[in-house]
Image: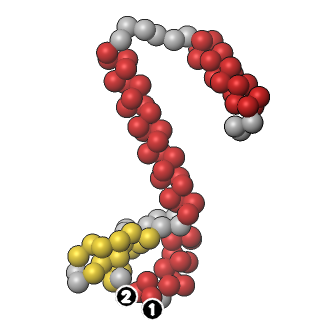
Amino acid sequence: MPQIRPVSDLRNNFADISRIVHETSEPVFLTKNGYGDMVVMSMEAYESYQFKSEVYFKLKEAELEAKTTDKRYSHKEVFDELRAELSDQMESGDV
């Protein structure tokens, strides 16, 4: 069940909100004048959300490419390409 609190709780009950977002890994929705205004979440939850969003975006991108082209890649081709990119990054110091 989502936690919905007035925005004033951010100032008045910061420690409680911090505890909630860290213990539950769920966001707390803050309202202002009865309307949604902000969302507060832990850094870990935010990073997880961003990672999942990026993976979802990449999968959608791959689906679109699969629909628009007949080119397919084997497991070996994909991993050889990844190894080559990682090797290049290691040599250039980008990793």
Number of marks present in the image shown: 2
Seen in the picture, residue 87 relative to 2 is either above or below; the reply is above
| Left or right placement of residue 28 versus residue 45 in this view | left
Residue 4 in sight in this render: no
Quadrant housing residue 83 = top right
**Structural distance between the alpha carbons of marks 2 and 1:** 6 Å
The answer to whether marks 2 and 1 mark residues whose Cβ atoms lie closer than 8 Å is yes
Residue beneath the point at 48% across and 50% down: 50
Residue beneath the point at 37% across and 31% down: 60
For badge 2, the amino acid type reads Ser
Q: Disc 2 marks which residue?
A: 8
- Assign a secondary structure to mark 1: helix
Return the x and y of residue 26 as percentages of the image width and height: 47, 65
Return the x and y of residue 88 as percentages of the image width and height: 70, 25
Quadrant housing residue 53 = top left
Direction front: furthest residue: 92
Seen in the picture, residue 21 relative to 46 is either above or below; the reply is below
Residue beneath the point at 68% across and 20% down: 84
Return the x and y of residue 35 as percentages of the image width and height: 23, 76
Seen in the picture, residue 24 relative to 70 is either above or below; the reply is below
Direction left: furthest residue: 34
Residue beneath the point at 53% across and 77% down: 18
Assign the C terminus to one quadrant of the image: top right
Direction bottom: furthest residue: 12
Q: Disc 1 marks which residue?
A: 12
Return the x and y of residue 31 as percentages of the image width and height: 30, 78
For badge 1, the amino acid type reads Asn
Residue 84 in sight in this render: yes
| Left or right placement of residue 86 versus residue 36 in this view | right
Assign the N terminus to one quadrant of the image: bottom left
